[in-house]
């Protein structure tokens, strides 16, 4: 759903300008230093990028899902590490509060997330619980007006920068499954919360992950999301339904960028006396990439519109995430192939994208988890 095409066009133009003029020239520096400079972060805040999906009443832009994926296509035309910094505030780090938070929780946290004053982080995965999220072991034991949280969360995006964490923890030790899980807002300064060393990763340099360790952290009961125990797993799944559409949009944007770079290179690079773009085997790689990007983009837009219509999009989000992230991997592979030897060298940048986009097939639910979600829903619906 697009509420006001004129305003959206202006927003997309300002994002595209910021990406082209400020972020693209900084890609290799950020990759080398593993740090996004403060002045760029300040500009992201000023542009409102931290609050795109947070309701307007809390200072965000309140974008619809369709508007948000269009912004996502634009933002993803550069290294995904830039997006990663503000993405959790629009997505998994804030949506638990947006979707299921109490009025008091929304008032306390959302405007600070929208402005970028604090970073929100989503803490679901643990050392022994990844794809099987419902088996998580972090506990939250009620103690008067508090919950005592113990456990370790792993691979937590933006944890080193985060001000708050949406933490899924088992509040009912008698229940081993999803029903015993609740979601909490845990502030970084609550005593007993510590961070592990920042992870060294294959890509996404500039975006940071680490373990988050909870050692008898006393969390006020008022920070139980929604004020009711046992709903945390469903909150997490709803958050991920939205997050998966966003990752799909990011995959489309990154693939568009890589294809564009491959076309420019294929036009410039000459072999056998002419630009390699004139060879049909190279053209096939460009054509296949374009067709697959178009298919993925159509899926993303359709899933987004369905969500805006209030429909359940668990299946469509999984389809879009699976197809778009796998497509992005194929486009990355072809782009490196078009670049040939140059594709293997850091200075051309395409190998960095190749490494960066590998993550899209893994995080927010691997391709295999998306297959499982799609097949389960399909079998349930056709039973
Ligand atoms: N929206 C709302 N509720 C949902 C839901 C969704 N999209 N998906 C599941 N639920 C509900 C189910 O309806 C069920 O509720 P009831 O018990 O009331 O029926 C409950 O949640 C448990 O669901 P389910 O039985 O399907 O859970 P499973 O443990 O079998 O597995 C998968 C669910 C595998 C799909 C889930 O664990 C998953 O998505 N894993 C991947 C996690 C992930 O993406 N990690 C990335 C970390 S974030 S970077």
Image: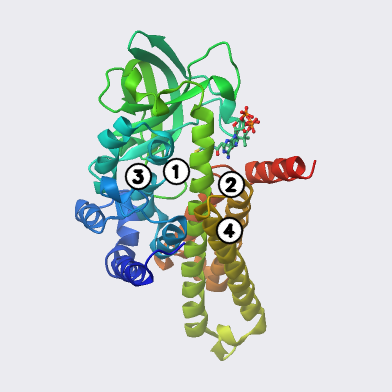
| Residue at x 29%, y 30% (from the top left corner) | 104
State the separation of the CA atoms marked 4 and 1.
Answer: 22 Å
- Image location (x, y in percent) of residue 288: 64, 72
- Coloring applied to the structure: rainbow
The residue carrying mark 1 is 201
Q: Nearer the viewer, mark 3 or mark 4?
A: 3
Q: Nearer the viewer, mark 3 or mark 1?
A: 3
Q: Are marks 3 and 4 in contact (CB under 8 Å)?
A: no
The answer to whether residue 344 is visible is no
Which quadrant of the figure has residue 112? top left
Q: Is residue 269 above or below residue 293?
A: below
The residue carrying mark 2 is 312
State the separation of the CA atoms marked 2 and 3.
Answer: 23 Å
SS under mark 1: loop
Mark closest to the chain's N terminus, 2 or 3: 3
Q: Nearer the viewer, mark 2 or mark 3?
A: 2
The residue carrying mark 3 is 89
Which quadrant of the figure has residue 11? bottom left
Q: Quadrant of the C terminus?
A: top right
Mark closest to the chain's N terminus, 4 or 1: 1
Q: Quadrant of ligand 1?
A: top right
Mark closest to the chain's N terminus, 4 or 2: 2
- Image location (x, y in percent) of residue 205: 38, 49
| Residue at x 34%, y 48% (from the top left corner) | 54
């Amino acid at each position: 759903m697009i509420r006001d095409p004129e305003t959206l066009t202006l927003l997309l133009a300002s994002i595209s300008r910021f990406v082209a003029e400020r972020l693209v020239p900084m890609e290799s520096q950020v990759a080398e230093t593993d740090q996004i400079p403060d002045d760029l972060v300040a500009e992201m805040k000023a542009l409102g990028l931290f609050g795109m999906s947070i309701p307007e009443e809390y200072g965000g832009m309140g974008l619809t899902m369709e508007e948000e994926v269009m912004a996502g296509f634009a933002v993803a035309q550069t290294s995904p590490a830039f997006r990663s910094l503000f993405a959790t505030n629009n997505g998994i780090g804030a949506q638990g509060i947006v979707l299921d938070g109490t009025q008091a929780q929304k008032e306390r946290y959302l405007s600070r997330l929208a402005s970028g004053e604090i970073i929100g982080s989503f803490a679901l995965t643990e050392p022994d619980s990844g794809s099987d999220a419902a088996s998580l072991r972090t506990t939250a034991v009620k103690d008067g007006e508090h919950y005592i949280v113990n456990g370790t969360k792993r691979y937590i995006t933006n944890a080193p920068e985060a001000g708050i964490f949406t933490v899924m923890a088992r509040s009912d030790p008698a229940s081993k499954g999803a029903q015993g899980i609740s979601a909490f807002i845990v502030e970084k300064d609550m005593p007993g919360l510590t961070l592990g060393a920042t992870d060294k990763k294959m890509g996404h340099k500039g975006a940071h992950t680490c373990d988050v360790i909870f050692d008898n952290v006393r969390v006020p009961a008022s920070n139980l999301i929604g004020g009711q125990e046992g709903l945390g797993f469903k909150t997490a799944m709803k958050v991920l339904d939205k997050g998966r559409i966003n990752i799909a949009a990011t995959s489309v944007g990154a693939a568009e960028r890589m294809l564009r770079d491959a076309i420019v290179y294929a036009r410039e690079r000459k072999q056998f006396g002419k630009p390699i773009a004139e060879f049909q085997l190279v053209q096939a790689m460009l054509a296949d990439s374009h067709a697959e990007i178009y298919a993925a983009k159509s899926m993303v837009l359709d899933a987004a519109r369905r969500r805006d219509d209030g429909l359940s999009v668990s299946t469509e989000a999984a389809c879009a995430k699976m197809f778009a992230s796998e497509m992005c991997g194929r486009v990355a592979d072809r782009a490196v192939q078009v670049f040939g030897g140059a594709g293997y060298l850091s200075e051309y940048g395409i190998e960095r994208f190749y490494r960066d986009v590998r993550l899209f097939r893994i995080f927010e639910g691997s391709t295999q988890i998306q297959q499982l979600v799609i097949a389960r829903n399909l079998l349930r619906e056709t039973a």
